[in-house]
Image (spheres, rainbow, N blue to C red):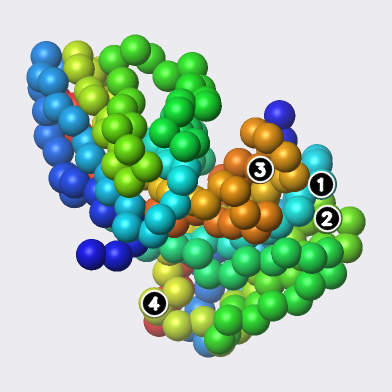
Amino acid sequence: ETGVTQTPRHLVMGMTNKKSLKCEQHLGHNAMYWYKQSAKKPLELMFVYSLEERVENNSVPSRFSPECPNSSHLFLHLHTLQPEDSALYLCASSQASTSHYGYTFGSGTRLTVV
Amino acid sequence: GQQLNQSPQSMFIQEGEDVSMNCTSSSIFNTWLWYKQDPGEGPVLLIALYKAGELTSNGRLTAQFGITRKDSFLNISASIPSDVGIYFCAGQGGVGSARQLTFGSGTQLTVLP
């Protein structure tokens, strides 16, 4: 596989469930990101991992818990979510050590909290 | 923090028409990027600009990095139905956390047959 792969593509969960989103990048990048995209709202940066260390946490509620076990994998653990957490969750990766870079995004996980 | 103003927020155009959208920033960027997002998918990089004044084309798409380094525009010529989607600009600064991308709020493009 190439690029950035996110699983699952769709997830419906109850407010008391615990689930995890998975992201895997096959590009040799050293930085990974979680974004939240709600309807008619801009992309919201949630977490940034660079060289497997979390370097940014943009005031995200503790019901979202990221994990980056290595430079190729990123998880977002979810528990006791609220309906307003329903959104498209996008993972991205980049090569942060180069002078020019863009992010490569996965296709996203469409999360619905019921 | 850095902010990007992207306009217009949405556009409805006839097939075959040209489209123009732009982004302005309160800060200087070293790189400007344009992404397109199809419904239900993640954004895909269309064009990257690395130098002030640079004009770059990708098929029917043309983008420019503004001389002041605080703005960029994207033009789409002779639009077709598959151009439908959300177009995002993104700017990248120089060092540290500023190297992270700052995204515009997107332009929703609808192409009418």
Residue kind at label 3, given as amino acid type? Arg
For residue B110, above or below residue A85: below
Is residue B80 visible in this depiction of the protein?
yes
Q: Position of residue B66 (x, y in %)?
A: 82, 63
Task: Check disc 2 and report the residue beneath it.
Answer: B69
Q: Earlier in the sequence, mark 3 or mark 1?
A: 1
Q: From the viewer's perspective, is the residue at label 1 or at label 4 nearer? A: 1
Q: Earlier in the sequence, mark 2 or mark 4?
A: 2
Which residue is depicted at the point 68% across and 35% down? Answer: B96
Q: Marks 3 and 2: in contact by CB < 8 Å? A: no
Task: Check disc 1 and report the residue beneath it.
Answer: B28
Using the image as rendered, state which of residue B16 and residue B43 is in the foreground.
Answer: B43
The Cα–Cα distance between marks 4 and 3, rounded to whole angstroms, is 32 Å
Q: Are marks 2 and 3 on the same chain?
A: yes
Q: Are marks 2 and 1 on the same chain?
A: yes
The Cα–Cα distance between marks 1 and 4, rounded to whole angstroms, is 33 Å
Q: Chain of mark 2?
A: B
Q: Element at badge 3?
A: helix
Which residue is depicted at the point 42% across and 33% down? Answer: A52
Residue kind at label 4, given as amino acid type? Ser
> Which quadrant would the N terminus of chain A be assigned to in this image?
bottom left
Q: Earlier in the sequence, mark 2 or mark 3?
A: 2
Task: Check disc 3 and report the residue beneath it.
Answer: B99
For residue A47, above or below residue A16: below
Q: Are marks 1 and 4 on the same chain?
A: yes
Q: Position of residue B2 (x, y in %)?
A: 71, 35
The Cα–Cα distance between marks 3 and 1, rounded to whole angstroms, is 12 Å
